[in-house]
Amino acid sequence: PVDWAAFAAWVQTLIGEHGENLLRLKGIVNIEGEDRPVVIHGIQHVIHPPVRLPAWPSADRRSRVVFITRDIDRRTIEESLDALQRAARAEAP
């Protein structure tokens, strides 16, 4: 599970830095403290409001996000996600 505020800030940062080349973003996210998944999707600088599904589609509760990009190296996204995770661990009590 991820902290929603930190995850949303991460997505906004990606959009701010790479929006024109972030052709599509979509995923299902496991949010801390929630028992239902949140679906996210967006195109370039536009992120649609997240939608809570009534239930998980399977027993798999992992978050999954798909990026379709132009001229953004996979490593760039992975490194930014790693930085988010390190920051979240540093803030944890």
Image (spheres, grey):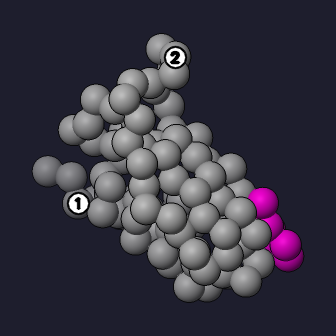
Return the disc, 1 or 2, that comes first in the chain's sequence: 2
Q: Nearer the viewer, mark 1 or mark 2?
A: 2
Q: Quadrant of residue 50?
A: bottom left
Q: Badge 1 is on which residue?
A: 91
Range drawn in magenta:
68-75
Q: Is residue 75 visible?
A: no
- Looking at the rendered structure, the secondary structure element under dot 1 is helix
Q: Position of residue 2 (x, y in %)?
A: 36, 47
Q: Position of residue 39 (x, y in %)?
A: 49, 46
Q: Is residue 76 left or right of residue 85?
A: right
Q: Residue at x 60, y 80 (%)?
A: 45
Q: Badge 2 is on which residue?
A: 58
Q: Is residue 28 visible?
A: yes
Mark 1–mark 2 Cα distance, whole angstroms, equals 31 Å
Against 18, residue 90 (above or below) is above
Q: Residue furthest left?
A: 93
Instruction: Inspect the image, locate mark 2, and give the three-letter code of the amino acid beneath it.
Output: Ser
Instruction: Inspect the image, locate mark 1, and give the three-letter code of the amino acid beneath it.
Output: Glu
Tell which of 36 and 13 is nearer to you.
36
Q: Residue furthest top?
A: 59
Q: Quadrant of residue 8?
A: bottom left
Q: Quadrant of the N terminus?
A: top left
Q: Is residue 51 magenta?
A: no
Q: Position of residue 67 (x, y in %)?
A: 71, 57
Q: Residue at x 48, y 75 (%)?
A: 12
